[in-house]
Image (tube, rainbow, N blue to C red):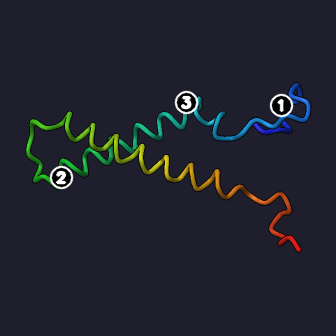
Amino acid sequence: MTKSQNRNSGSREIPVQVVREFSLSDDRLRQQRIAEKAHELYECRGCCHGRDLDDWLEAERLVLAAMEVRNEKAVRKPRSRLGGQKKS
């Protein structure tokens, strides 16, 4: 939800990352990335069975860490409201 969509908030703008935390599509995407990474780890180990939980937990750790780094970068570098124009 953006500022223009939230008409009851007055001049208060809700940060995008707060709203994104509760997005069902983001949760599905996160789960998909974890599953893909877990399968990649499984393949890297030579497709040996019996360590699926270890692979899942390691994949979860890696994916969530990468997402956190991406979110921190987005918070530090907010998009300019000038539409690409540089400030003088």
Q: Earlier in the sequence, mark 1 or mark 3?
A: 1
| Secondary structure of residue under mark 2 | helix
Q: What residue is rendered at 22% in x and 41% in y? A: 55
| Secondary structure of residue under mark 1 | loop
Q: Amino acid at mark 1?
A: Asn
Q: Which residue is mark 2?
A: 43
Marks 1/3: CA–CA distance: 19 Å
Q: Amino acid at mark 3?
A: Leu
Q: Position of residue 12 (x, y in %)?
A: 85, 34
Q: Position of residue 25 (x, y in %)?
A: 55, 35
Quadrant in which the N terminus is drawn = top right
Quadrant in which the C terminus is drawn = bottom right
Q: What residue is rendered at 31% in x and 48% in y? A: 37
Say left or right for 34 vs 38: right
* Outermost residue toward the top in this view: 8
Quadrant position of residue 11: top right
Instruction: Say if 50 sits above or below 84 in the image.
Output: above
Q: Nearer the viewer, residue 17 or 43?
A: 17
* Outermost residue toward the right in this view: 10
Q: Which residue is mark 3?
A: 24
Q: Position of residue 63 (x, y in %)?
A: 39, 46
Q: Contact (CB < 8 A) between labels 3 and 2?
A: no
| Secondary structure of residue under mark 3 | helix
Badge number at residue 6: 1
Local packing at callout 1 (Cα closer than 10 Å; few below 14, some 14-19, many 20+) is few
Say left or right for 60 vs 29: left
Q: Earlier in the sequence, mark 3 or mark 2?
A: 3
Q: Nearer the viewer, mark 1 or mark 3?
A: 1
Q: Earlier in the sequence, mark 2 or mark 1?
A: 1
